[in-house]
Amino acid sequence: MKIAVIDADLIGRKKHRFPNLVCEKISAYWKEKGTEVELKLDYKNFVEYDHVYIAKVFTDTPVPEELQETERVHLGGTGFYFDKAPNLPEEIEHHMPDYRIYT
């Protein structure tokens, strides 16, 4: 299985350099299961991945308008939902982050 993690703030905000904790937790969770995880720096070639997780913190971070949540594409974070963002599943929320995903 192959997982892509996209930090939309990293792509859409030129001076943004803060790692997204959710992206780190999703990465660690899947890597623990033996899955290949990649931090993608674009919105291309989603067909190459079994799941694509896109997270953003800021509501004004631009993302392609055609992005929609599907069985394979998962959107999350306050940037998409403001104060109505759904919680992460417990097993991801309480997982030790993968701090190396941004290196």
Image (cartoon, rainbow, N blue to C red):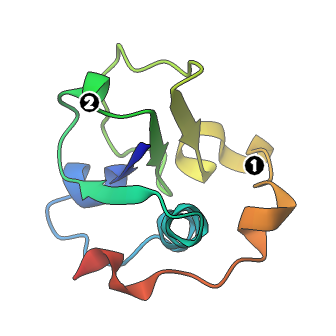
What residue sits 35% from the left and 34% below the top? 49
Q: Measured from the top left, where is residue 8 in percent x and y?
A: 34, 49
Instruction: Give the quarter of the figure containing the N terminus.
Output: top left
- Circle on res. 62: none
Q: Measured from the top left, where is residue 37 in percent x and y?
A: 37, 58
Spatial CA distance of label 2 from label 1 is 32 Å
Give the residue type that dot 1 points to: Asp
**Pointers 2 and 1 in contact (C-beta within 8 Å):** no
Give the residue type that dot 2 points to: Glu
What residue sits 23% from the left and 49% below the top? 12
Q: Is residue 92 above or below residue 47?
A: below
Quarter location, residue 39: bottom left
Q: Measured from the top left, where is residue 7 in percent x and y?
A: 36, 56
Q: Is residue 65 above or below residue 22?
A: above
Could you tell whether 19 is left or right of 40 in the image? Answer: right
Please tell me whether mark 2 sits on a helix, a strand or a loop: helix
What residue sits 80% from the left and 54% below the top? 89
Instruction: Give the quarter of the figure containing the C terminus.
Output: bottom left
- Circle on res. 83: 1
Residue at the far right: name it.
90
- Circle on res. 48: 2
Q: Is residue 102 above or below residue 2?
A: below
